[in-house]
Amino acid sequence: ARPAPAAALAWAAAAVTTILGFGMLVLAILGRDVSLLLVLAPLSYAWMGCVLLTRRPGHPMGPLLCLIGLADVLAVVPYTYARYALVHSPGSLPFSTAMLWVNTWAYAPATSLGGMVLLLVFPEGRLVSTRFRPALWAALAFIPLSVAGYAFIPQNLGVLFRNHSNPYALPRFDFLFEICQAAAIACGLMAGIGAAASVTLRWRRADRVGRQQLKWFLAVLPVTLASLIAILVLPGTASLALGVPAGVVMPVAIGIAVLRYKLY
């Protein structure tokens, strides 16, 4: 039988993630760059999604993990590419300026899907009730608002990119970009509050086995949040290395729950 369209797309997303991941791994090794560690996160999500697609076909969590892996690798690609083409081997690769620009906003889908949507739908792969739809909409609205807010605003990209500025900045529209940034932050806060409420409600409603399943998620959640905060608040090589657990421990915890408690 042919796989369902969602499953077929998920397998394709996992394949693209793997190909791009290993491509970026080569660049990171050639440049001896810390982005070598960042490739682990998208591969972890994509491959765990494939496990769920195989073990629990038709369940929405498998495609979601594959999609998170794809979003993660699309955030890592411009970062690794720009680091190599502008820092380690200037002029060696084409489109370095374009990749530097993409790096200013490419994180938005991964942040929304992995940091908000996953928390809202874990572990069944759906919202705990229709009351959480506004939180889901806010998580999805975060993506275009964040892209619009950061893609064209003048900004120094820091020491990791030798203090290059946004190559496609439009200073005359700063006010509009700042409004989009504020709206993105508001949506992120709304989605975050909704995610916390969703996890709490699921815990209260869960039976003994359900709580054992949720414990794996709750055990790694502080590490994940701390790693994400380190990347956002203290950008730099050290914080990027600390941020590796944000993308690795969560899919590993989901995998343990699948194999031990038959979560899905």
Image (cartoon, rainbow, N blue to C red):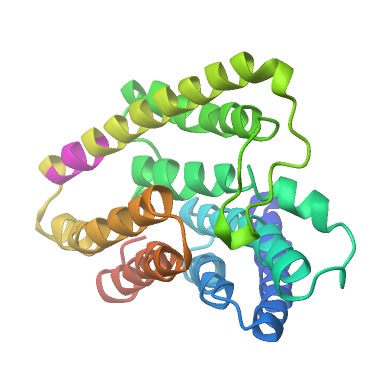
Q: Main secondary structure of the magenta part?
A: helix
Q: Position of residue 185 (x, y in %)?
A: 43, 28
Q: Is residue 217 visible?
A: no
Q: Is residue 23 left or right of residue 55?
A: right
The question of residue 175 being in magenta is answered with no
Vertical arrangement, residue 14 with respect to residue 131, above or below: below
* Quadrant assignment for the N terminus: bottom right
Residue nearest the observer in this picture, 204 or 220: 220
Magenta stretch in the rendered image: 198-203
The correct choice, above or below, for 240 with respect to 188 in the image is below
Say which quadrant the C terminus sits in: bottom left
Q: Position of residue 262 (x, y in %)?
A: 31, 68
Give the quarter of the image for residue 146: top right
Q: Is residue 210 left or right of residue 8?
A: left
Residue sitting at x 61%, y 38%: 155
Q: Is residue 241 at all visible to an observer of this figure?
A: yes
The image quarter containing residue 258 is bottom left
Q: Quadrant of residue 34?
A: bottom right
Residue 89 x/y as whole percent: 78, 75
Q: Is residue 27 above or below residue 242?
A: below
Question: Residue at image x 65%, y 85%?
Answer: 29
Q: Is residue 183 left or right of residue 199?
A: right
> Is 135 positioned to the left or the right of 15 in the image?
left
